[in-house]
Image (cartoon, rainbow, N blue to C red):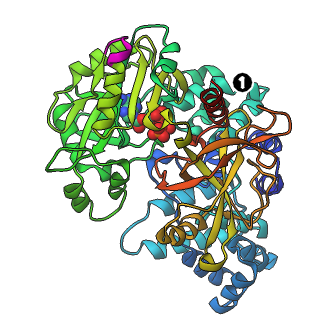
Amino acid sequence: MVDGLSKLEQTSKRLELTTLLSSLFKSVGADELPYVVYLIQGKIYPDYKGVELGIAEKLVIRALKMVTGLDEMTIEKEIGKKGDLGIVAESLISKKKQAALLYQPLTIGRVYVTLDRMAKLSGAGSQSQKLSLFINLLNDCEPIEAKYLIRMAIGSLRLGVADYTVLDALAEAFLGSRDMRGSLETAYNVSGDLGLVAGNLVNGGLESVKKIGVELNRPIRPMLAERAKDIPEALKHMQNDFICEYKYDGERVQIHKEGELISIFSRRLENITVNYPDLVAISKKKIKPDVAIVEGEAVAIDKNSGQFYPFQELMHRRRKYEIDKAMAKYPVCLFLFDIMYLKGKSTLNLPLKERRELLRGSIEVGKMIKLTESLRSSELPRIERMMEDAIENGCEGIMIKDLKSVYRAGAREFSWIKIKREYKNELNDTMDLVVVGAFHGMGRRAGNYGTLLVAAYDEDADTFKTVTKIGTGFKDEDLDMFPKLLSKYVIDHRSARVDSNLKPDVWFEPSVVIEVQAQEITLSPIHTAGLDVVKKGSGLALRFPKFTGKVRDDKSAVDATTVKELVEMYYSQRKIRTG
Ligand code: ATP
């Protein structure tokens, strides 16, 4: 496995990354494959389980001290010189140690099981138990194994292997070609669990993968909306009856109810149940069936006026402590818009019209739990009026949804279309872009990042393509915050999944998503987003980009604005100007 890891680390080409990963997958045993799929992304479980490896660097240093017999000062000095704990361990662990009497070679299974045990230990005495488990592993490590083991443990592996890369590689390894990714994607979309998909694939083939269905307490990847700049444009896409709904500016929540057990998942499938004790209580009471999965938007409201607060206020819920205070200050109202599972059966393949009826029959509407405000009409003036109402009421705009459409987990299609207020104004679009690099600041910004290099997501290539450098819109606290936020993702080379002609001072593993506003999308000789699409030799860039102040914690890198969307936005602004 270490051989595979070091090759993965060295490549800077996305396609090669997939091929190398595919060879690695083929080289391990069937039992080990799911473990490798998790470990390669620095995890031991899918995200929704909320089990974090999170082994502290301090513990690793203590373990290294015991294994090498060196004192802490010497080790710290080495870290100061080399910067990376993995590399330090590789150079310090001597072969001599492994010649010891009880040397047992490492296996993937042993590493996984030990890390799993360590992650689950808590409470009194857990630190010393963790330490001795880790020492056992390190004692049996080859130097290069120590390097990767430590990186896995402290979460600094950063191989740039995203979910789609894993799916491509699995398809290439076991179905003959990455073109077969689609057949694995459905299972991944309903389960959010790559290890499960890999395990079923290697043990029971495609048939077994197809059996992966909706399950309670396992989040489904959310269905997403395409965008339109105005209502007439949206209506052009609607071939069937449709419904218009308010587009609330809150946090998307997927609620699983199994009797008294309520689990709440975010848009990116994290378990956020602890952040919403109020939603748990209300779901227990007001979702009528014993077993169901429903979806909606949680919106922060002003206790006194009942008016909506914008999305940012909900981020106060994203803390570990003092949830009670946040809950009292920012109570939420839940607006439900879909149902995916009812009484033991998936409802994903039912048309929206039927799903809505099932949803309506499944909840008892109250002050804090409602169905989304909706309108069934195809008359343009009525829909326009609804849009104005929605905005006046603190919503972002409206959603228009095809009533015949099924729930396509993980897909962004025109059966759901969002129209936001900003899209009406060509100069006011916002985009969610991924930070892939940074340039050091000067003057007032010395010591911090001066500008960030941001990118859009290219779904077809599974890469990130740069679209602008951004240096405005940062408040002083943002300038202090970014180095801290980004420090976890620093890498010493360009990620294989980033396409860039620019060379920033610092590279990042694509992870952090920020909201950016721009005046215009223009052609660019430098940036790689949309290269050759609009004009040969040119990419797309943003004119007057500005950070809006929003870090999109609720989005992962692949949820960022796509290159395809940028191209659409480019054309729609041109239509306005020349038309
Ligand atoms: P955005 O950046 O505009 O919030 P997004 O990329 O998070 O969009 P989209 O699918 O593009 O996700 O837009 C739909 C989002 O809008 C949902 O993820 C959900 O959080 C929110 N939303 C608000 N009201 C509704 C509604 N009535 N139906 C579906 N989604 C809604």
Label 1: few (<14), some (14–19) or many (≥20) C-alpha neighbours in 10 Å: some
Evaluate whether residue 494 shows in this view: yes
Residue at the image position 15 percent from the left and 47 percent from the top: 305
Above or below, 162 relative to 367 = below
Q: Quadrant of residue 177?
A: top right
Image point 65% across, 92% down: which residue?
73
Which residue in the protein does label 1 denote?
A: 180
- Give the percent coordinates (x, y) of residue 135: 61, 73
In the foreground, 148 or 531: 531
Picture layout, residue 166 above or below residue 102: above
Q: Where does the image place residue 449, in percent across and percent down from the top left?
A: 63, 70
- Which residue is nearer to you in this view: 402 or 56? 402
Question: How many numbered badges does the structure rendering display?
Answer: 1
Whether residue 341 is visible here, answered yes or no, is no
Q: Residue furthest top?
A: 240
Query: Does dot 1 land on a helix, a strand or a loop?
Result: helix
- The stretch of residues the image draws in magenta is 376-382
On screen, residue 487 versus residue 461, left or right, reads left
Q: Residue 250 placed where, x, y %? A: 35, 43
> Between 256 and 63, which is closer to the camera in this rendering?
256
448 or 34: nearer the viewer: 448
Give the amino acid type for the residue marked by disc 1 in the picture: Met
Q: Is residue 8 above or below residue 23?
A: below
Image quadrant of ligand 1 equals top left
Give me the residue at 52% from left, 45% from top: 46
In magenta stretch: residue 328: no
Residue at 66% from the left image edge and 71% from the top image edge: 138
Q: Assign the C terminus to one quadrant of the image.
A: top right
Left or right of 243 in this view: 281: left
Q: In the image, is residue 378 part of the stretch drawn in magenta? A: yes
- Image coordinates of residue 83 in percent, x first then y, are 71, 77
